Each structure stands twice: as structure tokens, then as C-alpha cells.
Image (cartoon, rainbow, N blue to C red):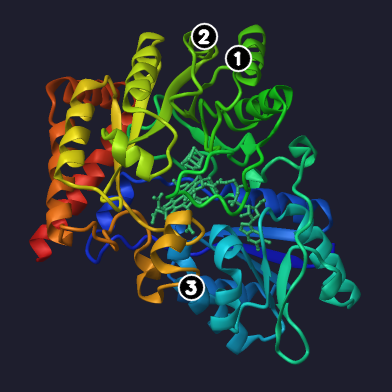
Amino acid sequence: MLGEIIFINPPYEQVSAGTDYLKHITNRSPSIGLLLLASKAREIGYTTEIIESDLEGLSPETVAQRVLEKNPKFVGITLFTVGVFNASIIAKIIKEKNPNIYILVGGPHISSMGYETMERFGEFDVCVIHEGELILENLLKTIENGDSLEGVNGIMYRDADGIIRKTTPPPTIEDLDSLPIPAWDLLPNFPHGYLPAIYDYPRSPVATYSASRGCPFLCEFCDTSTFGGKIRYNSPKHVHSVMRHLSEVYGVKHLQFVDDLFVAHNARVIEFSKLLIEDKIDMTWSCTARVNTVKPETLALMKEAGCWEISFGLESGSDWLLDEMKKSQRVKTAEQAVQWTHEAGIKVKGLFMLGYPGENQESINLTKDFIKRVPMTTMNLSKFTPYPGSPIYRKLYGTSIREEDWDRLNGMNFVYQAEGFTEEQLDSEYKEIIKSFYKRPQILWYYTKMSLINLTHLKRLTMFFLGFFRSKIKI
Ligand code: B12
Ligand code: SF4
């Protein structure tokens, strides 16, 4: 063995103080990126461990302590913008106590804001930009051999004079099947300890998986800096074998595909669905699609193959605002896609956004009407957030980070207010939209049925309400 590397998903669950009870109903799934990197590191001879801070309820200080006790050679931290400050606390404590531990960082935040992050946080030794498996392998070997980091593509590092150097990016990984499968065995209590958001799965245990990388669309609010615009896939055969592995080894009953765009090409989805129909696995699944990538024939096959739910980025009920977002879709197309999906017997999860630049009372009203019209079972409304790496971020703020917002960039705060609105007004519209959807009798009935069919929902809801009432009593 070459030594130990500990991978960390830092704590970033900080919606607002006193709302800890939300953890009972929010998404509790592990980082697939870290699972893949850990698998790669193990393949080349390292002992590995993964710390999912939020899922284990750990503070930055406790994470650092745990690392120091293990005294690994390397620490690898994955970073969303929202987690950077906490990651820096972890790294600072580690470096103060043991400067020999190499701290590597990567992830969506680094792919877009690597340089600024290196400049600001001296405790991060190396940034790995874009997809990390092959870069990590090369980087670890180079460090072990004592060679210059200059020869490692796809990183940023400080040279002997402390100057930040950026190397050329390597080509993207074309053959995704060549990557090892995620190291789920490293997660304590997998799969039972990891669940998506409440009501987002019909059966449990659940696992998540990404079967493609990249998205060719250019929605202005989306950060595609990690995987870029060229779409690459795992072969249907490979995905089928991963599903079989999850079923046979872990008893997983539902798989959530988290690809940016699972239904990009109908031919591939048809091949995958046919494979599942011929060689059945006792597993339902959900995935993502765009409203203009689904067809009734494909949806029928997907349903037969076990597809339970499709998430669509519907965003808004206003064509004008969709154009502002460069979403390349029409409200009419969205309505049709949702209807087709519903008719195929697949649940629809509609993803909406409130407060995009240009949003006005008319577009909000159009969204409210749209939500009433279409047959969705779940609706997710995010508060528009300019994420570093997205084109809208560059339009609004240029290329540097507005650091005051870092730990609020989680889609749950109106860090930007559309012209003509205050944060309070947007919050009030937000609440109204959510309430109007979830208080509809058919939706309440649907969730009641779900709670009785899969008791994990009922248990989570109870914990949530207990936590909620406890927090009110404290106040
Ligand atoms: C699944 C997912 C989730 C899941 C799981 C998150 C997780 N821990 O992985 C859940 C639902 C929990 C989630 C939550 C959030 N998410 Co999310 N999520 C995704 C999604 C759709 C796929 C991630 C994934 O699994 N990719 C596949 C794996 C293989 O890639 P990866 O994790 O990025 O890892 C690779 C590289 O980044 C790199 N790498 C990563 N870490 C490291 C570390 C080291 C040391 C090295 C060497 C390399 C490396 O190598 C990996 C392998 O190639 C992405 C979209 C995307 N395309 O990335 C958004 C995305 C990552 N999410 C995003 C955001 C903003 C969030 C939220 C903060 C808010 C929101 N609106 O959802 C919340 C956080 C909620 C909270 N509690 O505060 C943004 C991040 C933007 C940013 N700059 O921060 C993304 C990019 C969406 C987007 N297009 O804008 N998310
Ligand atoms: S929002 Fe969806 S379709 Fe648009 S660029 Fe992002 S991943 Fe692609």
C-alpha cells in the first residue's frame, strides 16, 4: 500500500440558523465524485476513506480532528462554492498541526474559481480542475516520485516562489466505462444511511449514479464548468451491470440518475430501456430530461423498464423569461412533454426558478398559472442564485467572487434581487407558490399514499415536524 488518502465532503448545510430539522427531509446522498476518486485511488494502491460531513453531522473542527488522528499522506476535498469556507477551516487546522499532509481540492467550485481560491486560501496545496480521476492518478504518482508538478495536466499549484501556476487541461475522458465503479463499500451504513429528498423515491434503499458527463445546452444560470458542453456516456451495458451490482451486493431498490441530461439521445435511452426489459433487475429509477428531448415512444419504453420519475427543468411559465435564461425551450413544449410523461405513467418532477434577472409580476403570475395547469407530482422551486461558473454570474459580477455570498449560494437565499423586488417580496412570492402547489387535495392525497407505501417518508416527516416544533418552543 502507498499510504492513506482521506476524501472529504465538507459541511455546507447551513440554510439558516435554527433550521437543522430540515435535514430530515432534504437530500442525503453522498458525493459520487468522491466515490469515484476513492475507487481510483484504491485501484492504484492507496488506502482510502470518505468523510461525508453533513451526513455524519460533523463540524469542520471534528472533521479536522479525525483526519489528524489518522495522519494520512493526502486529503482530497470536494468543493461547491457553498462549502469553501468550511473546507478552509478544516484545511487550516490540519495544516497548523501537520503541515506535511498534502491538501488537494477539486469539484464544481474549483473548475470555475480555482485561481481565486488558491490565491485566497494558502492552506489548499493543489487545485484539480474539471474531472478528476486521471489527473489525480498522475498527480499522486508525480508527488510520490518527487517530480515537478509542472508535468501534471489539469492542476493549479504554487511553485517554489509561491507563484500560482496553472497547467494545460488534459483531454476529457471519452471512455467513461474505463473508470472504476464508485466505492460504495467505503460508506458507513450504505445504502440505508443515504436517501434523496423526501418523496423523491418510491422504494428504498436508494443509490445515486451518474451515467453521462457534460451538457451541450447553454442555459445561462447553469454552471457546466466541470464537465463542459461535450456529452459523453457510459454504455447501456455498463449502466446495467452497475445496477445489477447495486441490487445484488447492496439490495438497492431505486436508483436516481443525477446526470445533467440523462435523456439526451433517444437512441441510447431506448437501447438502455430494452436491455432492462430483457434482463430485468428489481429496481426502479428516476432521471433527468429536457422537455424537447422526450418522445412518447421512448417514454413508454422507459416506463416498461422501471422509470418512476423524470425531472424537467421547467424554470418559468414565461416564454420571454425562458429566452432571457437562454433555456432554448417554450412553455408549450414543456406542457406537452409533461403531459406525455404523465400519460406514459411516469411521475413528473418540475424544477422551477424564481427571481431570475428580468423576472416581473407578470412572469411570476404566468409561472403560477403554469404550475396549476401541468400534471406534476413534485415541484421544486429554487431561489435564483448566480453560481460562479455560470454565464449569468459573469454577466452580473464579472469573473471575481463576491465573497460575502459564498456560504449563501445554495438556492435557498435570494442573494440577487430582480429589479423592482425586495428580498422580502420575493420570499413571500416563493412561499405562496410552494403553498399553492402542496396544499392541493390531489397532491396531499398523493403524498399521503406515498407515506403509507414507503414508511421511510412517514418517519422522516415525523422527525421533521418534531424538530420544527422543538425549534419554535426554543424561540
Ligand atoms: C447530484 C448533485 C447534487 C446532490 C449531491 C451532491 C454531491 N455531494 O455530490 C445534491 C442534491 C445533494 C446536491 C445539492 C446541491 N447542489 Co448539486 N449537483 C449535483 C449534480 C447534478 C451532479 C453531481 C455529480 O454527482 N456529478 C458527477 C460526479 C462524478 O462529479 P463531481 O462530483 O463534480 O466530481 C468530479 C469533479 O468535480 C472532480 N472532483 C470533485 N471533487 C474533487 C476533489 C478532488 C480532491 C479532486 C482531485 C477532484 C475532484 O473529480 C470528480 C470525478 O470526475 C451537479 C451538476 C454537475 N454536473 O456537476 C450539481 C451541482 C454540483 N450542484 C450545485 C449546487 C449549487 C448545489 C446546491 C449548493 C444548491 C442547489 N441548488 O442544488 C445544493 C447544496 C444543498 C445544500 N444542502 O446546501 C452546482 C454547483 C455550483 C457551484 N459552483 O457551487 C452544480 C454544478 C449544478 C449546476 N450546474 O449549477 N447536488
Ligand atoms: S440547466 Fe440542464 S439543460 Fe441547461 S445547461 Fe444545465 S444541465 Fe444543460
Q: Do residues under tags 1 and 2 come within 8 Å of each other at their CB atoms?
A: yes
- Label 2: how many Cα within 10 Å (few below 14, some 14–19, many 20+): some
| Structural distance between the alpha carbons of marks 3 and 1 | 44 Å
Q: Quadrant of the C terminus?
A: bottom left
| Structural distance between the alpha carbons of marks 2 and 3 | 48 Å
| Front residue (pair 365, 156) | 365
- Which is closer to the viewer, label 3 or label 1? 3
Q: Residue at x 21, y 58 (%)?
A: 419
Q: Residue at x 44, y 49 (%)?
A: 220
Residue 232 versus residue 408 in the image, above or below: above
Q: Amino acid at mark 1?
A: Ser
Q: Secondary structure at mark 3?
A: loop
Q: Quadrant of the N terminus?
A: bottom right
Q: Can you tell which mark lies on residue 273?
A: 1
Q: Earlier in the sequence, mark 3 or mark 1?
A: 1
Q: Residue at x 39, y 24 (%)?
A: 202
Residue 7 versus residue 403 in the image, above or below: above
Q: Amino acid at mark 3?
A: Ser
Q: Amino acid at mark 2?
A: Glu
Residue 43 versus residue 272 in the image, above or below: below
Direction from residue 104 to residue 79 in the image, left or right? left
* Residue 248 picture quarter: top right
- Write down the residue under mark 3: 400
- Label 1: how many Cα within 10 Å (few below 14, some 14–19, many 20+): many
Q: Secondary structure at mark 1?
A: helix
Direction from residue 128 to residue 364 in the image, left or right? left
Which residue is the extreme one toward the bottom? Answer: 161
Direction from residue 341 to residue 35 in the image, left or right? right
Q: Residue at x 79, y 56 (%)?
A: 170
